[in-house]
Image (cartoon, grey):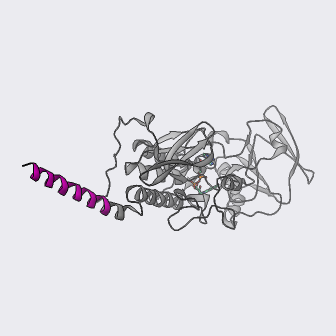
């Protein structure tokens, strides 16, 4: 039997006047959403701060249309968008509160203490929030690297995430990049009936299977090639390559990696490991007590199910620390002893009065 009731927090709970939150979670990707519904299911007041305007993280923003087939429980697969929407609904049903378009900038220690926890002040681009525990679930690689030669077109036909299905039909799409994300995007566009030209600066670095799939579906791959110039005319992008050829297309999908979030982590005063990710202990706690890190933000294995599992584990460790921190057993004994003494004293006083 479950050790908790799923609807722990009342529908009319007044979140507006909370003096502090039990848990503030940074990032509404798979790790943050799983962590949030786990803490809320255990009656902890939970706030999620998300930099973007929608929940879901990478599955929502980078591959919303992809049929994800390696998530347990979905034998026929599920799209990134649907998976994100479902997890978000589960979190809001549990009364997790969300702030979108708001970005974490700092986490400060305060001099306020609640039951042994020094409250933290989470500072964001829009305000600040006091809380007992923080769970960082903001992914390791947040902002896509941009390609200035295409950015200069200032066109909404240049995408840094795969556009939705309807956008591809009957069009030519160039995909820039040779990693897994780029090859995945090429497959998606091909499966939606687009002609696809993949432009790779060096050699492909993504999975050989996916590359073969691109070729089998009729995609063209240009290696050791980059775009030197681009123009836009009546909805058509002309991209000139350094090998002298020109490709005309209706869409350009750029997947050339992400900017590292290392500076953000260093600014938070966290110890990083050799790879520049946040270092954690076996309880997912970082070098700063009360701040946990889960999912891609520290992770070695970057998968949705792993991000979920870590989010859930950190949430339970945070819950345990809040409900029975390391000093609680001793303190409980001490409190019990005091109340016993108080009871005896008052009983003795009553006797005396009689
Ligand atoms: C193209 C591609 C295909 C993939 N396919 C699969 C697949 O088929 N199956 C699979 O299991 N995994 C897949 N993955 C990996 C999977 O998506 C990630 O492992 C997973 O999304 C990690 O979840 P996360 O919550 O840790 O991070 P993210 O999904 O990156 O979510 C982090 C969230 O934090 C927010 N954030 C970041 N910084 C801040 C800040 N300072 N303040 C507030 N919010 C912030 C971000 O906006 C984002 O919403 C794929 C990844 C890519 C790129």
Residue 349, x across and y down, in percent: 15, 52
Residue placed at 43% from the left, 34% from the top?
17
- Is residue 322 something that shows in the picture? yes
Image point (51%, 40%), residue name:
98
Percent position (x, y) of residue 180?
Answer: 68, 59
Whether 138 is drawn above or below 248: the answer is: below
Residue reaching furthest to the left: 354
| Residue 63 position within the rendered picture, expressed as x and y whole percent measured from the top left | 62, 50
Foreground: 116 or 138? 116
Indicate yes or no whether the magenta region holds residue 350.
yes
Please give left or right for residue 266 compared with residue 295 in the image: right
Could you tell me which quadrant the N terminus lies in? bottom left
Depth order, front residue of 183/43: 43
Look at the image and tell me whether residue 85 can be seen. no
Give the magenta part as a residue range.
Answer: 333-354
Query: Residue 122's quadrant in the figure?
Result: top right
Magenta stretch, main secondary structure, is helix
Question: Whole-percent x and y of residue 140?
Answer: 65, 56
The residue positioned farthest toward the right in the image shown: 244
Q: Is residue 161 magenta?
A: no
In the displayed orientation, state which residue is furthest to the front.
Answer: 352
Is 139 left, or right, of 205 in this rendering?
left
């Amino acid at each position: 039997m479950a050790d908790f009731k799923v609807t722990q927090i009342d529908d009319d709970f007044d979140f507006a006047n909370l003096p502090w939150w039990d848990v503030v979670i940074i990032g509404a990707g798979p790790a943050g959403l799983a962590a949030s519904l786990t803490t809320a299911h255990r009656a902890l007041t939970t706030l999620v701060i998300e930099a973007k305007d929608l929940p879901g993280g990478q599955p929502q923003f980078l591959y919303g249309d992809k049929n994800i087939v390696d998530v347990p429980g979905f034998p026929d697969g599920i799209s990134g968008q649907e998976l994100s929407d479902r997890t978000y609904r589960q979190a809001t049903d549990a009364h997790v509160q969300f702030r979108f378009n708001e970005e974490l900038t700092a986490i400060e220690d305060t001099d306020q203490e609640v039951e042994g926890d020094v409250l933290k002040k989470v500072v964001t681009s829009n305000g600040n929030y006091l809380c007992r525990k923080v769970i960082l679930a903001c992914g390791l690689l947040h902002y896509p690297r941009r390609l200035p030669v295409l950015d200069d077109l200032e066109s909404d036909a240049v995408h840094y995430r795969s556009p939705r299905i309807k956008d591809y039909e009957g069009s030519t799409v160039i995909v820039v990049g040779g990693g897994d994300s780029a090859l995945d995007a090429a497959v998606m566009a091909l499966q939606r009936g687009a002609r696809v030209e993949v432009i790779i600066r060096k050699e492909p670095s993504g999975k050989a299977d996916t590359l073969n799939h691109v070729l089998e579906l009729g995609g063209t791959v240009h290696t050791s090639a980059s775009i030197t110039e681009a123009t836009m005319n009546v909805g058509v992008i002309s991209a000139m390559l350094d090998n002298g050829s020109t490709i005309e297309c209706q869409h350009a999908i750029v997947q050339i990696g992400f900017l590292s979030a290392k500076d953000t982590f260093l600014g938070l005063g966290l110890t990083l490991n050799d790879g520049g990710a946040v270092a954690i202990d076996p309880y997912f706690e970082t070098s700063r007590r009360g701040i946990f890190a889960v999912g891609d933000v520290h992770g070695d294995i970057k998968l949705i199910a792993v991000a979920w599992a870590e989010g859930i584990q950190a949430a339970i460790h945070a819950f345990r620390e809040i409900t029975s921190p390391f000093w609680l057993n001793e303190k409980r004994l001490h409190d019990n002893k005091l109340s016993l003494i108080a009871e005896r004293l008052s009983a003795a006083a009553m006797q005396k009065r009689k």
